[in-house]
Amino acid sequence: MVGQEGAGQPEVGRRAVGQLWRPRADPGRLYRFCSNAHHEACNWLVPEDAPGVFCLACRHNRTIPDLADPTNLAHWRKIEEAKRRAFYSFIRLGLPLINRVEDPENGLAFDFLADPLGEGGTKVMTGHDNGLITLALVEADDAERNRRRTEMGEPYRTLLGHFRHESGHYFWDRLVRDGGHLEACRALFGDDSEDYGAALQRHYNAGPPADWQEHFVSTYATAHPWEDFAETWAHYLHIVDTLEMARAFGLGIAPRVEHGEELAAEVDFNPYRTTEIAPVIEAWVPMTAAVNSLNRCMGAPDLYPFVISPAVVEKLAFIQALVHGTLPGAEAGKGGS
């Protein structure tokens, strides 16, 4: 494994890392490619006068795999692509993005780790620990990830999904616990002081309750209030990001139905900026019905195989209010980056 924090500037690589560029979006300023462009793992830019060599997303990397192994390099590139998509949402929402150099105790950092060679080593587990998110490199192998998806009974297991879920644990610390919203969160998601290990063991032994779809967005959300929050957080990011893309393409859904236009939807608002959950859900439900139907026509799994119950809508509304700082009481602890 290779540490990345504070790494030096590489020699000019395939993306001409050492050259300066003047983007049309900001013509008054010169930029250079992120240092990880040298590995064809990043295409983001860094201002010429910025003190570091990494972009806003890559500066959170703590450990990357040994890139002398071509398989590791290929997997890491896929992971970085998913990470940038996750960071796009963090930036659009103005979430606090502090790295471990800026705050060694509370900063957000990533370890991308390969399983040890041989049969005796302990496999890497994807998870979160006090701001450090570990992602098993093997998750970038499509066959292995699909095997785990089936084995774990997770209908939606993706690299982007991992980033969004695990970031939910980190932002729970920053926005809920440190932001003064602990009691409000517990009133909706449950008591997080419940023994986490025992709750997970119970979940894996007994499975979810029979009526889980009435109260939770996924089976894993039933394991513990922390997981319920993280799963709901991830789904909020899934929803607003997908709706923004639909809006960018001018997509609208107006199916031919016998009685009225109950399923009609047009994304005529900014999903990342709205502070009302109703228009989000009113656009999302018919949109997913349409894309799921299109996938079925191609013999592919549903794009969004989940049910949004009224209880889940209430939880999504909490997440929305949390990220926009509109929850009553203490400040949500947001900080732009």
Image: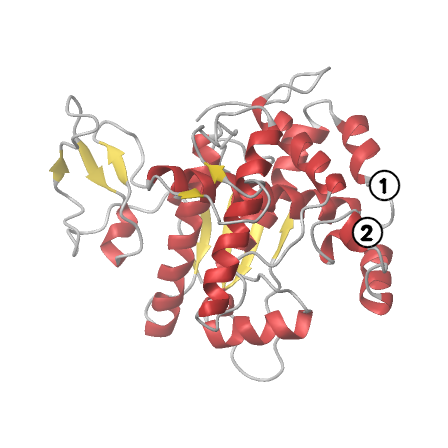
Q: Amino acid at mark 2?
A: Tyr
Q: Position of residue 57 (x, y in %)?
A: 40, 42
Q: Residue at x 15, y 21 (%)?
A: 28
Category of crowding for the residue at label 1, using alpha-carbon neighbours closer than 10 angstroms: few (below 14), some (14–19), many (at least 20):
few
Image position of 85 with respect to 14: above or below? above
Q: Is residue 280 above or below residue 332?
A: below
- Asked whether, in this view, residue 78 is left or right of residue 115, the answer is left
- Residue 167, visible in the rendered structure: no
Identified by mark 1, the residue type is: Ser
Question: Does 303 sit above or below residue 86?
Answer: below
Q: Position of residue 119 (x, y in %)?
A: 59, 84
Q: Quadrant of the C terminus?
A: top left
Crowdedness near tag 2: few (<14), some (14–19) or many (≥20) residues, C-alpha within 10 Å = some
Image quadrant for the N terminus? bottom left
Q: Quadrant of residue 324?
A: top right
Q: Nearer the viewer, residue 328 or 58?
A: 328
306 or 54, nearer to the observer:
306
The quadrant where residue 321 appears: top right
Dividing the picture into quadrants, the one containing residue 72 is bottom left
Q: Which mark is residue 193?
A: 1
Q: Looking at the rendered structure, which numbered label has been put on residue 196?
A: 2
**Direction from residue 46 to residue 271 in the image, left or right:** right
Residue 323: horizontal and vertical position, in percent? 58, 28
The secondary structure type at the circle numbered 2 is helix
Say which residue appears at 29% left-offset and 40% top-offset: 53
Separation of residues labelled 1 and 2 (CA atoms) = 8 Å
Q: Position of residue 95 (x, y in %)?
A: 52, 30
Residue 226 circle label: none
In screen coordinates, is 231 left or right of 214?
left
Inspect this view and state whether residue 17 appears.
yes
* Residue under the point 70% across and 42% down: 229
